[in-house]
Image (cartoon, helix red, strand yellow):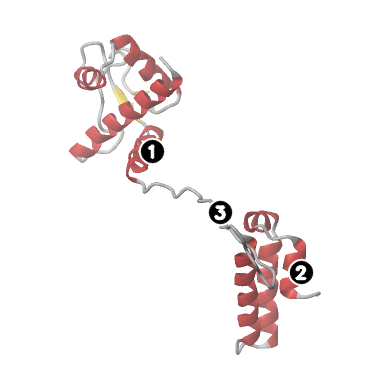
Amino acid sequence: MSKQRKETLIDELLVFMNDEIESTGHTIGTVRFDFSEQGEDTIKFAGDAGLEYDELMLILNTCKSRKYIIQKIIGAGQYGQLELSEEGQGRAISVEAAKIAPPRKESSEFHIGELNASGSIQIGNNNTQNIENFFTTIVERIDQSDATDEEKKEAKNRLKSFLEHPLTNTALGLTPSVIKGLFGVE
């Protein structure tokens, strides 16, 4: 069984279990599944998925090792009384959400035969020029506000601290020189 098929079957099993729980209005930890060789859930799931029992055992063992499902009652056989865990339900919900999520827009390429510009120009999605303009506007609006000079200075210092944080400026693509340019030399 390929890794991709295995992961697909894990997804299908967890979605099957979560659907059973949600259709009855119960919560995880209150519904048990019987995946023993002739168990009710084995018949439902393996029949729909077209699995042999040894393939189902492989999927169940993987789910148990990843803590997607847990065995609560000892003495019911290795697969007799299984419950869906929070991790398993989380994966099942994510799988279902991914099916209905709108497709991502792929970036488009445009061929421009000739481009003439009399000033600086920047073309493309996600460029830093828009981000810089946004923060320049914020600084200008702070300066133009009716606040006291002390309040304006505090607001700009907080904004500057935010932009100087390594995670923030990396995520925004701002260089130290851009940040200094926004606030002047202080």
* Residue type indicated by callout 1: Gly
Task: Kindly identify the residue that appears in the image at 39 percent across and 35 percent down.
Answer: 91
Q: Secondary structure at mark 1?
A: helix
| Residue 131: mark | none
Q: Secondary structure at mark 2?
A: helix
In the depicted view, which residue is nearer to us: 21 or 73?
21
Q: Identify the secondary structure beneath mark 3.
A: loop
**Disc 2 residue type (three-letter):** Lys
Who is closer to the viewer here, 106 or 83?
106
- Quadrant containing the N terminus in the rendered view: top left
Write the residue at 41% across / 25% down.
Answer: 7
Rendered position, 165 above or below 119: above
Q: Which residue is mark 3?
A: 111
Q: Nearer the viewer, mark 3 or mark 2?
A: 3
Q: Nearer the viewer, mark 3 or mark 1?
A: 3
Side (left or right) of 159 relative to 34: right
**Looking at the rendered structure, which numbered label has been put on residue 180?**
2
Determine which residue is flagged by label 1: 90
**Which amino acid type is marked by label 3?**
His
| Number of numbered labels in the structure image | 3
Q: Earlier in the sequence, mark 3 or mark 2?
A: 3
